[in-house]
Amino acid sequence: MRIATAAIYQHITRDLQSLTSTMQQLNESLASGQKYQNIYQNPVATVTALGYNCDLSRISQYQSNLKTAANWLTHTDSVLQNIGNLIKTAKELASQMATGTINDDNRAAAVSQVEGLMAELLAEVNTSINGQYLFSGYKTDTAPYLQLDGLEIQKVVESLQPGSGYSGTATASGTYSGETATTYLVEIDAAGAVGTATFRVSEDGGQTWTTGFTTSPAATSIWSSEGDKGVEIAFSASGNLAVGDRFIIPVSEFKYQGDDHGLELGVGKNSRLAVNVTGRDALDGSSGRNDLFQILSRLKSALQNDDANGTGAALEALNSSEANLTTYFGFVGAQQERVIYQQDSYQSLQNNLDKSLSQVEDTDLIAATEQLNLQQITYQAALLVSTKIMALSLLDYL
Amino acid sequence: MSITTLLEIGGRALQAEQVGVEVTSHNIANINTTGYCRQHVDLVTTPSIQYPWGNQGYGVAIDSIQRYFDPYLAQKIDAKTAAQQDYNTQKTELGSIAGLFNETNDVGLNNLLASFWQSWHDLADNPTGSAERQVVVQQAKALAAAFSSLADDLVQHRQALLVKISPTITKINAITASIAELNQQIVSVETSGQPANDLRDQRQVKLNNLASLVGINYFELDDGSINVMLDDGTTLVQSAAAWNLSYELSGGEVVIKCQGPGGVEKDVTDDLSGGQLRALLYVRDDRIPAYLDSLNELAQELIGEVNRQHSQGVGLSLYSQVTGTYAVDDGASALKDNAALPFGDQITEGETFNIYVDDGSGTNVAAATITITAGMTLNGLRDAINAELPAYLTASVVDNKLALQATGSYQCGFGNDNSNVLMALGLNTFFTSTSGDTQNFAFSMGINDIISADASFIATGQFDRQGQHAVGDNSNALALADLETARVGPGDLTFAEAYQDLVSTIGLDTQKAEQQGILLNGILDQYNDLRDALSGVSLDEELTALIKFQRAYEAAAKLISVADELYETLLTLK
């Protein structure tokens, strides 16, 4: 083929430029450590890297949430443990008092010991971390339990059956004439609207029942086998009550001020982790039985009145309260294990993602350096050949 | 048969070889001239003279000076040049747009989106924390600023392209005018019957320049002039006449018109193919609007979804007075699909939302369920609210926006909105955007003034059935954080995926243009090599030719001196 003189120079320029541009790219990717400097050099890899970056930031957020969760759970766990120890001490005391021959001095000492336990329990359940109360549900700004001056009829705790159509509220009222803290358990035994539905009442957590009450929008006196102590309940009319709907009326000198929401944190895609236990649940206040404060307060009055039966009953109640606490222990323990498991799995996921990201995004230093060396040699060879060709001319021989 | 014949043969030979030397030197002189085609002189024998002993040669004559030129190859080069310039210009323009979306740095939208969701998670971990609340506001502001600066940059880029289109058209018009002029010159020169080699070279260069700006077709007429058309057949140059292109803006888009013969205007915008002009139009009026649409759609969905969830919740503070951020066009026209409400289409009639009233110290005193009836207007909604809670608050319509003013120390909050009317009216919402203009979500994205003034209004919790709300409630913040992985963005993707989709579209568009450009560069290089092989000047060849003609000239001069000697011999006869 005929070669024009200008074409020779064009070829030399073009080839040298192509070599320099390759070297320039290698140089940039080596200097920056990143394979691609622009999204259009490899859009697929760039977008994959963006996806990995999103996943990584999400995972690091989940890990940070898990740390917060672990913090809550550790504190909750230690408070529950202290409450457990407290129940054990109370049990020992109750069993000593129930058996053995004891005199008034012993009893007086025991009474003040129970008072001490109650104060300790109040302090434990009112534990706060960074100004947030652990046992108040969502009301983290409010202490879960408040000690009142004497026994008071507390707000009704509702526990409706799933699918119950009742949407009104039940209100407790009256003036309590009894002497010991107790819990009235009101359970619907015939379904219907307010005015039709009937209920029964128990004062011992559902072991014995007094029947024959009808729901009403007006305050209705309720009593149990122990007689009428002035507690009343009124149902606002709205929807139908179902059999098994329960309304719990605690009479206690300790008032629960939190709510019934478990605090949850997000620890994965659509995955929530409960990180606390409400005070009412931990102290067994939502089952219809007496809660731990009431049990201790009953133990105290049993001791004051030298009521051996009462002391025995308190011992039994302490056992069931301890069993309840154990359930929540188990719950918290299980959550803590879940935290550890999740942390581990996120850690390995993070490692894998880091590796994948680096494969997509980072320059392979060894390969790039080798390539650069190769390019340099090629470039030098091209320069050498070019100068030789350029030097040739027929003019030199004329 | 005379000595004179010999002298004449010698003289013509001298002349012919001298022309040969001159043509060769013309070639050498133009070795680096763009578009120059090497020329050669065509020598022929002079008609012979008949003698009784035969036809005797009468020497050499110059027939013509021709150039080495392949019109078919030139057409192919011009066509490929148009395509190559199209893609290379696209690559340049798209590449600088791609730079706006260069996510290899840390402040890209992708990272800002991730940080925004992270801040919601942190807030859910500690809903009472004022630092966490401030971080949410700051991250949201950074995100909104990134959206609006991206949208702004894209619009600026579109403007800048207009500035490039105008000179391109001026250049096209200048080139077509000079082609017409060259046509005229070539026709007049070639009436002599000899080709106008250098003028033709110049015209070919102009044609190639024109092809790099806009795709063309052309053909040569018998008189030597060339007619040039756009690819759709619209004539730009006809013999000595040229017609101009012009542009105007119509609905924000550039329209290219050809001022044809007889003052007839023709819109050729969509018929352009190849060349820088088409690339500029394509990037300006096709690609950038598409990117802008995607970005706007993403911003719209983000604003909508965050506001929808946020309006369900309640923060640490309740409202003493609150005004919606979105205005309707007329208080008496229906809310659903209201033309001025950007999220008016989201309203579901027949559904309800709740207003809760608090005594100012955390105790619920009243609640109302408001139903959005079919065809309800803003005035109707105002009246419905006023009918439900006359003792606690007053609803009014201010500047076509809904405003609630609580009475005395009462405060109000919202929840359970199944009708989406709160989000549509901008009540208890998080993000804001321009009312009435649905195309500007990305550009106008901002934070609700109430929240940026007091972060305690960020709705982390929700009202419960009794109208109570607790400070530690993080349920709404968690629901907001969950939007990160929810497939509620454009095209049923997550917001991050939708953005990545946009980035990959821009990247792939640019990459495609770049790769096509490289491919065409290669093809063009090859064609140019072929052209040079035929038309390019080779120094070795020309130097050889120079010596060839020089020697022939010397020989011709020798003929003259032989003739001279013959005369002398003759004259000395006595």
Image (tube, rainbow, N blue to C red):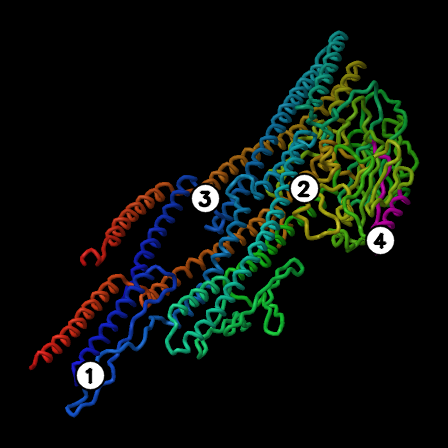
Q: CA distance from mark 2 to mark 4?
A: 29 Å
- Asked if A291 appears above or below B559 in the picture, the reply is above
- Which class describes the residues within 10 Å of circle 1: few (<14), some (14-19), or many (20+)? few
Residue identified by numbered label 2: B479
**Quarter placement of the N terminus of chain B:** bottom left
Q: Amino acid at mark 4?
A: Met
Whether tag 4 and tag 1 are in contact, CB under 8 A, the answer is no
Amino acid carrying mark 3 in the image: Glu
Q: CA distance from mark 1 to mark 2?
A: 106 Å
Chain containing mark 2: B
User: How far apart in space, not on screen, are marks 2 and 3 (Cα)?
Assistant: 33 Å
Going 43% across and 45% down the picture, which residue do you hit?
A35
Which mark is first along the chain, 1 or 4?
Answer: 1
Q: Which residues are magenta?
A: B363-388
Looking at the picture, which amino acid does disc 2 mark?
Ala
Image quarter hosting the C terminus of chain B:
bottom left
Amino acid type at image mark 1: Gly
Q: Which residue is mark 3?
A: A361
Provide the secondary structure element on which disc 3 rests: helix
Query: In this figure, which residue is indicated by the disc labeled 1?
Result: B57
Mark 2 or 4: in front is: 4
Q: Quadrant of residue A101?
A: top right
Is the residue B65 above or below the residue B141 in the image? below
User: Do the residues at pointers 1 and 3 share their chain?
Assistant: no
Q: Hey, which residue is sitting farthest right in the picture? A: A218
Identified at 73% across, 31% down, the residue is B471
The vertical placement of A243 against A251, above or below, is below
